[in-house]
Amino acid sequence: MRTPCFPLLVILLTSMIGVFVGCDYGRGSIEGIMTDESGKPVAEAIIIADNSVYGSILIRTDEDGHYSFNNIPVGKWEIEFYHESGRGLGLESATVRSGETTRLDFTIGAKPPPTNLPTIIPP
């Protein structure tokens, strides 16, 4: 005869497997190109990926306007776009899925910056 605690024991043991195996729920990437209104790549722009659980990651675009957040945890990320001077340009959302690369290109002026984006990068 099983005791009433048996289902609880099974749940406890299976949840502990994640601790020993390593609770990696997957990682993916976000990448894209930042361009100006005329379609030219924007070098040295500042891109910030922000996630409510994992915090923020700051990178810069390369000379071809390319940026890439590699090997970041799955979930929803807010991507903030700033001019190299720190002026806020735009805010987009991206969802990272395990083993996938999410493409997110950004064109300055394609739409107005949202009001909740700081006009200057916060300290």
Image (tube, rainbow, N blue to C red):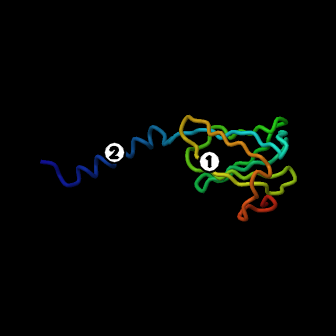
Structural distance between the alpha carbons of marks 2 and 1: 35 Å
Looking at the image, residue 82 sits to the left or right of residue 69; the answer is right
> Which residue is farthest right?
85
Percent across and percent down for residue 117 are 73, 61
Say which amino acid is labelled 1.
Ala
Q: Which sits in the foreground, 111 or 121?
A: 111
- Where residue 31 appears, x then y in whole percent? 69, 39
Q: Which mark is residue 13?
A: 2
Check disc 2: other Cα within 10 Å, few if <14, some if 14-19, many if 20+.
Answer: few
Q: Residue at x 59, y 38 (%)?
A: 28
**Residue 51 left/right relative to 42:** left
Identify the mark at residue 94; answer none if there is no mark.
1
Left or right side of 47 for 53:
left
Q: Earlier in the sequence, mark 2 or mark 1?
A: 2
Could you tell me residue 16's position as x and y percent?
Answer: 39, 45
As drawn, 57 above or below 98? below
Quarter of the image with the C terminus in it: bottom right
Helix, strand, or loop for circle 1?
A: strand
Closer-to-camera residue (118/56): 118
Residue at image location 58% in from the left, 50% down from the top = 76
Which image quarter: residue 116?
A: bottom right
